[in-house]
Image: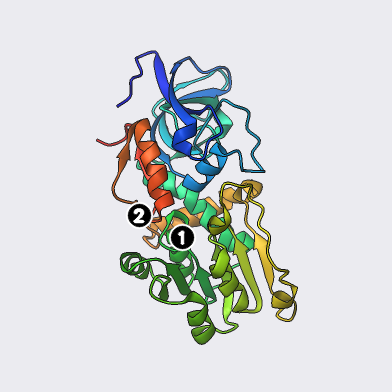
């Protein structure tokens, strides 16, 4: 439960570099002020969890984000506008909004420039997942992967927050989706999303399956795991195949996200294939088009948002939610209720 009063709110602040998010952070009470000109004051109702990023931030191991302690935390949140500053014309009290800006997520209230927020149709948490992770999936496939209808697409961590959107978007395009995940329950979940072939890496060898069933046949692969799965995807790219790197979870051991490995020239040269980095923060000009396409699929029922269970609540619940995501047990998007449930 929040301990904030009527004129205060609470937020999670990273105060020391530590091995884990929980160890480095504390919950601080802050004054609730009026928005300055050009700002909004938003009451956050839900936040989205990015456990790997949060942990790497706590370790000061994210090269592309320079932090100065103390720093507030969290990226994604959905809330309702409480007040608007002078000169703000596009928002009004009561509007539902989403932010995907670092330090705007793990807090009960957010006072920030209006440009940090996107108006959404309602305070349904679906919009939080769609505007953050869903848009990431669309950009990864369309902008970096240059996905074409009917192609063969391989996806790692397919049951996760990003993965479950990737599977559905690719399936909606008529693609043959090869989904990699761990465990029978996740395999059944991913199959229900439209995956054509599900590889349970706990029961099957990913490299052997791909080499036997999809030799040189993968047109687009999206990998957020690295390690052996990256190697298997790379080895089985089709001519002009595209391997999109959206993360390297298996290689992050508390060090900066710099991955070293053997040269891959021979694996891509003779196929005219490519390995492409996906950094969503560098692709903001593509977000509006991605939202338009994704929201259309959502309206048509071709993409649905799935949330992980169990649910978490309050700022205190964020610590547990981060650890849940890191455990590998979650399926779908992990969120925390900050006061949005009826």
Foreground of the two, 296 or 166: 166
Label 2 crowd bin: few (<14), some (14–19), many (20+), radius 10 Å: some
Q: Is residue 245 visible in this depiction of the protein?
A: yes
Does 87 sit above or below residue 105?
A: above
Q: CA distance from mark 1 to mark 2?
A: 11 Å
Foreground of the two, 156 or 305: 156
Taking the image as shown, residue 264 lies to the left or right of residue 326, namely right
Q: Is residue 272 visible in this depiction of the protein?
A: no
Q: Quadrant of residue 236?
A: bottom right
The tag on residue 163 is 1
Does 71 sit above or below residue 200?
A: above
Does 154 sit above or below residue 338?
A: below
Does 24 sit above or below residue 225?
A: above
Location of residue 77 in the rendering, given as x and y in whole percent from the top left corner: 45, 37
Helix, strand or loop under label 1 = helix
**Disc 1 to disc 2: CB gap under 8 Å:** no
Mark 2 sits on what residue? 306
Give the position of the C terminus as an image quadrant: top left
Location of residue 175 in the rendering, given as x and y in whole percent from the top left corner: 49, 74
* In the image, farthest residue toward the left: 342
Location of residue 197 in the rendering, given as x and y in whole percent from the top left corner: 42, 77
Helix, strand or loop under label 2 = loop
């Amino acid at each position: 439960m929040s301990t904030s009063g009527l004129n205060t709110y609470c937020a999670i602040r990273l105060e020391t570099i530590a091995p884990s998010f929980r160890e480095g952070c504390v919950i601080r009470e802050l004054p609730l002020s009026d928005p300055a000109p050009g700002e909004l004051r938003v009451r956050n109702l839900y936040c989205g969890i990015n456990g790997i990023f949060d942990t790497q931030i706590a370790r000061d191991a994210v090269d592309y984000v320079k932090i100065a302690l103390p720093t507030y935390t969290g990226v994604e949140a959905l809330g309702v506008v409480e007040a608007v500053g002078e000169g703000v014309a596009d928002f009004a009290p009561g509007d539902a909004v989403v932010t995907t800006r670092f330090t705007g997520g793990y807090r009960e209230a957010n006072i920030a420039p209006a440009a940090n927020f996107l108006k959404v149709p309602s305070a349904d948490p679906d919009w939080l997942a769609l505007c953050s992770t869903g848009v990431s999936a669309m950009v990864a496939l369309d902008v970096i992967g240059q996905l074409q209808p009917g192609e063969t697409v391989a996806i790692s961590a397919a049951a996760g927050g990003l993965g479950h959107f990737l599977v559905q978007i690719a399936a909606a395009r008529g693609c043959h989706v090869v989904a990699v995940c761990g465990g029978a329950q996740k395999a059944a979940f991913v199959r229900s999303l439209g995956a054509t072939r599900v590889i349970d890496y706990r029961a099957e060898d990913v490299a052997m399956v791909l080499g036997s069933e999809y030799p040189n046949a993968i047109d687009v692969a999206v990998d957020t795991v690295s390690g052996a799965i990256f190697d298997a995807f790379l080895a089985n790219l089709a001519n002009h195949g595209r391997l999109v790197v959206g993360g390297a979870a298996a290689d992050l051991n508390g060090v900066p996200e710099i991955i070293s490995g053997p040269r891959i020239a021979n694996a891509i040269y003779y196929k005219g294939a490519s390995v492409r980095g996906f950094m969503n923060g560098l692709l903001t000009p593509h977000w509006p088009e991605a939202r338009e396409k994704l929201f259309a699929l959502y309206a048509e029922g071709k993409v649905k948002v799935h949330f992980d269970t169990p649910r978490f609540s309050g700022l205190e619940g964020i610590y547990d939610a981060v650890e849940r995501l890191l455990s590998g047990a979650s399926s779908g998007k992990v969120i925390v209720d900050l006061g949005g449930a009826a």
